[in-house]
Image (tube, grey):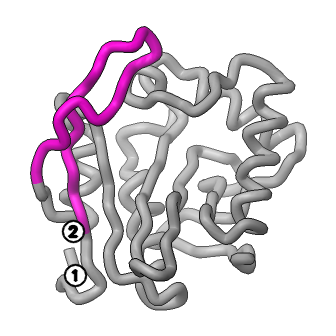
Amino acid sequence: MLKPVELQAPGLRLRPWENTPGDRRAALRGLADPDFRRWNTPVALVDGEEDARAWTHGRVDGWRRGDTASFAVLEDTEIRGHVSLNVIDYGARSARVGYWVLPEARDRRIASRAVQAVTGWAFHDLGLHRLELRHDIGNEVSCRVGLRCGYVPEGVMRQARFDLGGAPHDVHLHARLAVDGPP
């Protein structure tokens, strides 16, 4: 079990997702966004209230299992996006970072601020050593987030993601180590 925490970033508050109507509405908007779907292949599509309920329940459950730490990213009192540590492996001291931002909140470095906060927490509080950040080749916005947050490009993972239509996509791998200097 991983104890849910709240984190602060400049101008942002990161709190665990809750299975509430407001959180479900925000999750549905983010996960149904065409740009999100262009660059990500969700495990299950989120197309309605019940799908959003299952998704938020899964975020809550991830904390209980200890393998996922998911945060709603709030600016003022409004959810603006999501950031998470996924595939947390305490033996390997590693995890993957994931994030998305609602369309109206983009171009304000919300993802970068949230990723920085989660990165610091993962290294200092969880004792992780390596965090990976992956994005499709061509997703320059996600690439900039990784670079801004000190995630070093390590190479291309050939055909590592399949889109919703089944077509393979190459993925750019970035990583940050606990021993890396500040970004």
Q: Which residue is mark 2?
A: 150
Q: Quadrant of the N terminus?
A: bottom right
Q: Quadrant of residue 6?
A: bottom right
Residue 85, relative to residue 6: is it above or below? above
Mark 2 packing: few (<14 Cα in 10 Å), some, or many (20+)? some
Mark 1 packing: few (<14 Cα in 10 Å), some, or many (20+)? few
Residue found at x 25% / y 71%? 176
Residue 1 located left or right of residue 112: right
- Check disc 1 and give the amino acid type: Pro
Let me know if residue 34 is in the magenta part. no
The answer to whether mark 2 and mark 1 are in CB contact below 8 A is yes
Residue range of the region highlighted in magenta in the rendering:
155-175
Q: Residue furthest right?
A: 20
Q: Quadrant of residue 75?
A: bottom right
**Cα distance between the residues tagged 2 and 1:** 7 Å
Residue found at x 42% / y 52%? 111
Residue found at x 45% / y 51%? 98
Residue 29 located left or right of residue 176: right
Asked if residue 57 shows in the view, the reply is yes
Let me know if residue 156 is in the magenta part. yes
| Residue 182, label in figure | 1
Secondary-structure class at tag 1? loop
